[in-house]
Amino acid sequence: MPDEVDNKAKEILRANDKGGFTVPTGGLYPYQWNWDSMFVALGFATFDRSRACQEIETLFEAQWSDGFVPHIVFRREDPDYFPGPSVWQAGETLKTSGITQPPVAATVVNKLWSETEDESIRERLAALFPKLLAWHRWFHSCRVPEDVGAAVVIHPWESGRDNSPEWDSPATAIDVSGIEPYTRRDLQHADPHMRPTKQDYDRYIALVEYGRGTGWDQKKIATEGPFRVADVGMTMILLRATRDLLELGRRLEHDDVLPEIEGYLRQLETGVDYLWDNDRKTFCSRDTVNGRHSGMVTSASFLYAYAGAGNKEQREHMMKHWERISASAEYTVPSQDPGDENFDHMRYWKGPVWIVVNYMVSRGFAEQGMQEAADRIRTDSGRLIEQHGFNEAFSPKTGAGTGGSDFSWTAAMWLAWCGDGA
Ligand code: GLC
């Protein structure tokens, strides 16, 4: 049985490989996505390290000259997906979207580098260092305001947690009255009850049109745009990636830039306090326009451990949330607290379990000595996949798959982390 599941996982990666880059799944997501590819690289690395490097290299082919790395790379026009390249109108050497996604890349490159002694692979990974550094510099010039210190997202898609209830209140400020008529394509591939609503989509498109209207002037969008939310997921992931970039920089003896990276680290370490909601006693996202916390405990809140963030008291509060949530969910980690009024066990980021977030949360818990919690998440993840397949996400109540099937990053996490052979 385990062998069969392993083989199926490899088959999915091969089938979704479009020639040096992998699509998240056929149909629903026919292009290369930023953070999907980085998790996919971990999957490929279990049987083909060279292909793993290539997945990262192809993403960075789309990097802009200012360091920005897009959330989607469009190598051809595909009528199955909206909004495509003609809507975004962004990119330099390749057509891209105009927003980014959580920067897991430095963490992945550092991990792959330390796990191999193969010089040709190490050289390829080392060649990515300046590109990673350029992306982190971009974050600090365009997404980490000095007075906030945490990472701001300018579009819900940038967070990678598209319809998290954390965005609902800040998104009411988005004016959708002028948007061009459009046809959604996602509903041809997935059940509408598992997808964002029309109101969500109108706002997504309004933000794309706003960004395009500025000529993708990232500084302007981040200081004047209608949606500017300090995201707990993005911040924790960036903080962790900065630690890994620093470690990689030391390993590669890039001594000249280490103080700069240490400066970024200090800024983010202070910035996480901006995300601490002292009323709800949780790390959560916060609207920088009006200063309001979401007050919600999402799966991204638990990334504090992965980031190595939080003082003793904050960590104790987070563990209380963990005890409550893990006791109320059949499968961890629900993307939204099941006790929250916005919880919906089948609707995307309003409840379903996402295996890549599980991987990061579990890794963080293990590193912070919370082995039992880490093991629970890993076991739940393996059970979900074995019993229900390589879905995009899963109900934390029933385990049923939600969204698309044959998902690359779910397959990759089986191979690299929660499968029997991993
Ligand atoms: C959805 C997810 C996002 C992911 C993308 C491709 O938009 O919310 O995190 O990167 O699909 O799988």
Image: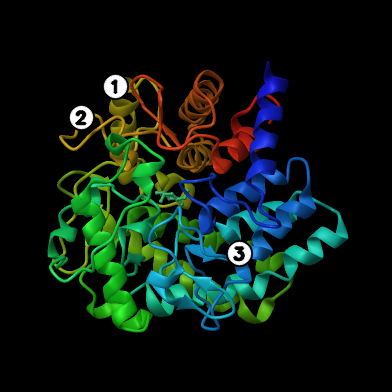
Marks 1 and 2, the one that precedes in the sequence: 1
Marks 1 and 2, Cα distance to the nearest angstrom?
A: 8 Å
For the C terminus, the image quarter is top right
Q: Which residue is the extreme one toward the top? A: 1
Residue type of the residue flagged with mark 2: Gly
- Is 395 situated above or below 166? above
Residue in front for this viewpoint, 9 or 314: 9
Q: Position of residue 15 (x, y in %)?
A: 66, 42
> Given this view, does label 1 or label 3 mark the residue nearer the observer?
3
- Any part of residue 372 in sight: yes
Name the residue type under label 1. Ser
Which quarter of the figure is the N terminus placed in?
Answer: top right
Query: Residue beneath label 2, please?
Result: 339
Q: Which residue is mark 3?
A: 59
Q: Whole-percent x and y of residue 186? A: 37, 47
How many numbered circles are shown? 3
Q: Residue at x 28, y 46 (%)?
A: 196
